[in-house]
Structures are given as C-alpha cells and as structure tokens.
Image (cartoon, helix red, strand yellow):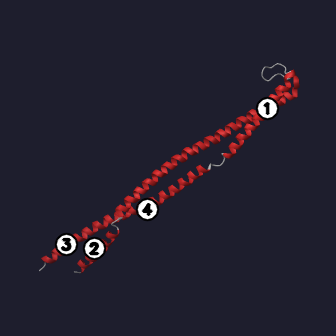
Amino acid sequence: MRRADDTVQQLERIRGRIQKLAQAPQRLRDLEAELMQLRADSAEVTGDLEVRTMEWLRERQDAETKLQAYRSRARELKAKIEALEVVGAGAPCPTCGRSLQDHFGSVMGDLADEWDKLVQDGRWWRRRREQLELKPPALQELESRSLRLHAEIEALAERVEHGRSALRELEDLRDHAATLERTQAMDAGTDTLEP
C-alpha cells in the first residue's frame, strides 16, 4: 500500500509540474517567431550597415585621392612658377616653348590664377577629407542599432534554449507520468486479484 501512496503523490507532483509547463510549447513557438523576426531585422540592418560603410570608405578614399592629386598638381605648378620667375621674361613658354618676352606678365598672371584656384579646390578637398575622418552620425546609429539587435538576439536565443529545455522537461514528465499511471493501473489490477 505504501508503494501505491508514493506513486499517487509522485503523480500529483508530476501533474502539477506538467500543468505549470502546459504553455511551454506555445511560449517556445512565440519566442522562436520573435527570434526569427529579430534575425531578419538584424540581417537588414547589417546589410544597410555594410552598404553605408562601403559608401563612407569610398568617399574617404575619393577625398584622399583628390587631395593628393591637387597637392601633386600644386607642387608641379609651384615649381613651374618658380622656374619662370628665376629666368624672367626670356623664359620659354610652358606650352609652346617660344620665348615669353612681352607675354611674361600675362602668362604669370594666368599661372597665378590657376594656382589660386588650385589652392582653393585643394582646401575644399582637405576639409572634405577631414569631415570624412569620423564616421557619419547615420553610420554610427546603424552600428549602434546593429549591436543592440545582436545583444537582443543573444538574450532571446538564451530564452529560446530555456524554452526548449522546458519543452523537453514537459515531454519527459508526460512520459514518466504515463509510466507511473501504467504502474498504478497494474498495481490496482494486482490488488484486485489478490485474495
């Protein structure tokens, strides 16, 4: 009789636990659906982040390339101007090679204008390069959002794993309860057969 009482108590505890875990399958489905949605959101943000990062890097490289080209052109032009100043009016024309003579002033004026324009454009590209040294705020926000989503995914994946454990426990408890019920039924059948 003691064994039967133990079985009844054990079954009551198991049924109570089964009742507490009854919502585990639905909770797990909900968590898995939420996790899938978060992963989809994360994939979209990661894609946007990669595109924007590549655009930013391309702009930075473009600004650096343009700035270097302007600096190189400025060095060449400065060297040309200095060479003409040293030789003076008898210097050969930088374009056709004939002596400048009377055209020296206008050629030097044209070169000075070109120099001024080159310096202005070079300053603009230097400022542009400096602006692009730091990541744009929109890119920083995407990075932050991506990190938050990854953290949420990790936390939710852990909850999903707990949900799977609860589901396994529920299945094990149901199996154990069925075994105990069979044992109880067999014991009840044995008791009725005994004289």
Q: Quadrant of residue 53?
A: top right
- Residue plotted at (40% across, 56% down): 33
Comes first in the chain, label 1 or label 4: 1
Q: Are marks 1 and 4 in contact (CB under 8 Å)?
A: no
The label on residue 2 is none
Distance from Cα at disc 2 to Cα at disc 3:
12 Å
Q: Secondary structure at mark 2?
A: helix
Q: Quadrant of the N terminus?
A: bottom left
Closer to the N terminus: mark 2 or mark 1?
A: 2
Name which of mark 2 and mark 4 comes first in the sequence.
2
Residue named by callout 2 = 11
Q: Categorize mark 4 by other alpha carbons within 10 Å: few (<14), some (14-19), many (20+).
A: some
Q: Which residue type does callout 3 highlight?
A: Ala
Q: Which residue is mark 3?
A: 185
Find the distance from the CA under tag 1 to the CA under tag 4: 69 Å
**Label 3 vs label 1: CA separation?**
107 Å
